Amino acid sequence: MTIYQPAEDSYLMSRILKEQIPDLLEKNPNLKFLEIGAGSGIHLETAKNLGIKKENIFSSDIDNKSVSHCKMLGFNCIYSDLFENISRKFDVIIFNPPYLPEDSREPKSSRTATTGGKKGNEIILKFLKQAKNYLTISGKIFLITSSLAEDVDFKKLDYKAKEIGCEKLFFERLCIWELE
Ligand SMILES: C[S@@+](CC[C@H](N)C(=O)[O-])C[C@H]1O[C@@H](n2cnc3c(N)ncnc32)[C@H](O)[C@@H]1O
């Protein structure tokens, strides 16, 4: 496996964090932040630069290379398949998930970072079923979805969902959802 290098989806998430985190931090200076699937650690750096206390920034990845890399950057990062090794609650949880439908042309080395299952949304659905147990009462999730995957019925999964930023690419539309 290779560490996912920041791309358009990462930059969209960075933009949303810069828009959303300052207000949330003003309300709660002790905000606890978790990123599932931290990859290169780009959002951990953003979270730190926006003023989230370093000891309140947590992260995980299913890829051991990413875990070692984020640890080397000085962040708290653990190996975990979604929430399997996580046991506390957070005020903000972010996930730029693997969201593309399976494609046999995709090299094995990058599939873990990009492929979300046959329809593309399987990992997202698994994430959403677990995530509510790790959110504080007023906590928020920022999650990316792609128009190339099957839609997610957030209401059916008991989430209040708001689209807060989208980006039209050549062949797909990426959106970030704020979920409560
Ligand atoms: C699209 S990349 C995003 C990386 C980085 N967060 C960014 O925005 O640039 C998806 C990341 O999720 C990780 N990942 C995939 N499945 C996962 C799972 N089940 N649990 C935790 N992390 C997972 C991948 O290893 C990869 O680092």
Image: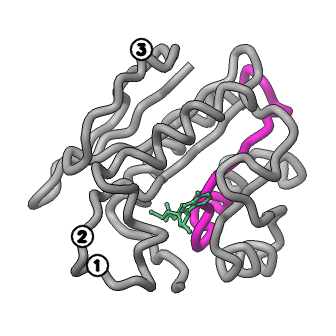
Kindly identify the residue that appears in the image at 39 percent across and 21 percent down. 162
Q: Residues within 10 Å of mark 2 (few under 14, many from 20)?
A: few
Q: Is residue 62 magenta?
A: no
Looking at the rendered image, the disc whose residue lies closer to the viewer, 2 or 3, is: 2
> Along the line of sight, which residue is nearer the eye, 64 or 51?
64
Quadrant assignment for the C terminus:
top right
The residue under label 2 is 103
Helix, strand or loop at label 1? It is loop
Cα separation, mark 3 vs mark 1, equals 32 Å
On the picture, is 8 further left or further right than 158?
left
On the picture, is 47 further left or further right than 77?
left
Cα separation, mark 2 vs mark 1, equals 6 Å
- Name the amino acid type tagged 2: Asp
- Name the amino acid type tagged 1: Glu
Q: Residues within 10 Å of mark 1 (few under 14, many from 20)?
A: few
Q: Do the CB atoms of the residues marked 3 and 1 lie less than 8 Å apart?
A: no
Q: Is residue 39 magenta?
A: yes
On the picture, is 58 further left or further right than 93?
right
Kindly identify the residue that appears in the image at 16 percent across and 53 percent down. 172
Helix, strand or loop at label 2? It is loop
- Name the amino acid type tagged 3: Lys
Q: For disc 3, does the CB lie below 8 Å from ligand 1?
A: no
Labels 2 and 3: the sequence-earlier one: 2
Q: Do the CB atoms of the residues marked 2 and 1 lie less than 8 Å apart?
A: yes
The residue under label 1 is 106
